[in-house]
Amino acid sequence: MPLGVGIVGAGPGVAALHLPTLSRFAAEFEVVHISDSGGGRAAELAERVGARSSSGIEELLHDERVEVVVLCSPPAEHAAQILASVAAGKRAVLCEKPLATTTADAQAVIDACREAGTALLVGTNHLYDPAWGRAKHYLLAGEHTVRAISVTLALPPNGRYHEVVTELSSPAAAPGRGAPDLSVPPIAASVVRQLITGLAVHDLPMLRDLAPMIEEVLFARAVAPIGYVVGYRASGIPVRLTTVMLPDGADALWRLDITTDTDLLEVSFPPAFVHSGSAEVHVTADTGKRTRYPINPVDGYQAEWRALADVLNGSSVVEYDELLDDAMYALTLADSAAELIEGGIR
């Protein structure tokens, strides 16, 4: 019998990612309940899959058919909803990024899940993408020394983040159409912190694999209209994160570049909300030779659900310490970058 899945949230990620992915795991999972914040979108999505719908989280957690909870809610709600799922006796939680928005909440969530034996997985689909496994194997097998890392994002507008910066703006501080005045340090700091915990967090677990110890955040600033540039040093390696969302849209670019002692390794991730297989991996050697590895038909979304299925069938285990360390790495970076900006050191 497949395990009953309850999904909290009914946005584009649910419609375009989780529901299509779960349809490929019919033997393991069945969507039985979808809830939203009251907009009515849950009813429409639930009807597609023959599931129940509701508003809020309480009715979903009281649904005895729900054994696995998927959290696609706003980040500030994640920790409390994980704790509520654990208290309701659910077997597993798949939480979209981030796990929590404070270090105290991250610790509380991991402690509760560990004590209850609740399976927990964070939806860092880039970490589960088969292309990252290939890239990491290349680095380890060749004993390459990593010299520098950069992550570059150019993204079309995302309503969620535009709403965030609009909420952070005030009529006195926002010059027209709700755009944030990034010259105001507290506003710029809050924008960058939320973008790091919401966007950079996709890639930070991979960066922690390569550069696990954050030593110093060297610079951080908000980029208009919505974006950031952050530079830090971790385990002796310089890391640069650059993101911009353009109001007129952009050709989506999401690329991780790793410079080693002998070559350049590029991992180019597909746009969000599509199923187009894994990321692309290219290696450019110091001789100029360029190698392109084949795209795996399995994408990171499928791989993360397979990982959860493996935990639930007993063929894998939850790495609670890794999940906590990933969360702390992201929050440490976000807090340090915000502190620099708010202090006027940019």
Image (cartoon, helix red, strand yellow):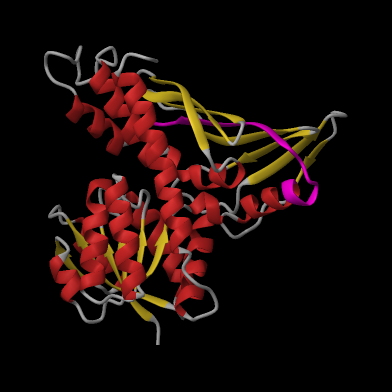
Q: Which region of the structure is painted magenta?
A: 139-156
Q: Is residue 153 magenta?
A: yes
In the rendered view of the protein, which quadrant contains the C terminus? top left
Point out residue 125 in the picture as x, y percentages from the top left corner.
49, 53
Count the labels in the image: 0
In the rendered view of the protein, which quadrant contains the N terminus? bottom left
Point out residue 310 in the picture as x, y percentages from the top left corner.
51, 74
Residue placed farthest to the right in the image?
Answer: 287
Residue 225 is at least partly visible in this image? no
Where is residue 78, by image quadrant?
bottom left
Q: Is the residue 272 above or below the residue 185 in the image?
A: below
Picture residue at 14% right of the left edge, 70% below the top: 59
Where is residue 86, by image quadrant?
bottom left
Between residue 16 and residue 9, name the one nearer to us. Answer: 9
Picture residue at 21% right of the left edge, 71% below the top: 87
Residue placed farthest to the bottom in the image?
Answer: 1
Where is residue 176, by image quadrant?
top left
Picture residue at 36% right of the left edge, 18% below the top: 224
Q: Is the residue 335 above or below the residue 304 in the image?
A: above
Q: Is residue 345 magenta?
A: no
Point out residue 324 in the picture as x, y percentages from the top left corner.
41, 54
Is residue 333 shown left or right of residue 55?
A: right
Residue 28 is at least partly visible in this image? yes
Is residue 329 shown left or right of residue 254?
A: left
Between residue 292 and residue 58, name the one nearer to us. Answer: 58
Is residue 135 shown left or right of residue 185?
A: right
Picture residue at 24% right of the left edge, 22% below the top: 187
Point out residue 41 in the picture as x, y percentages from the top left corner.
21, 56
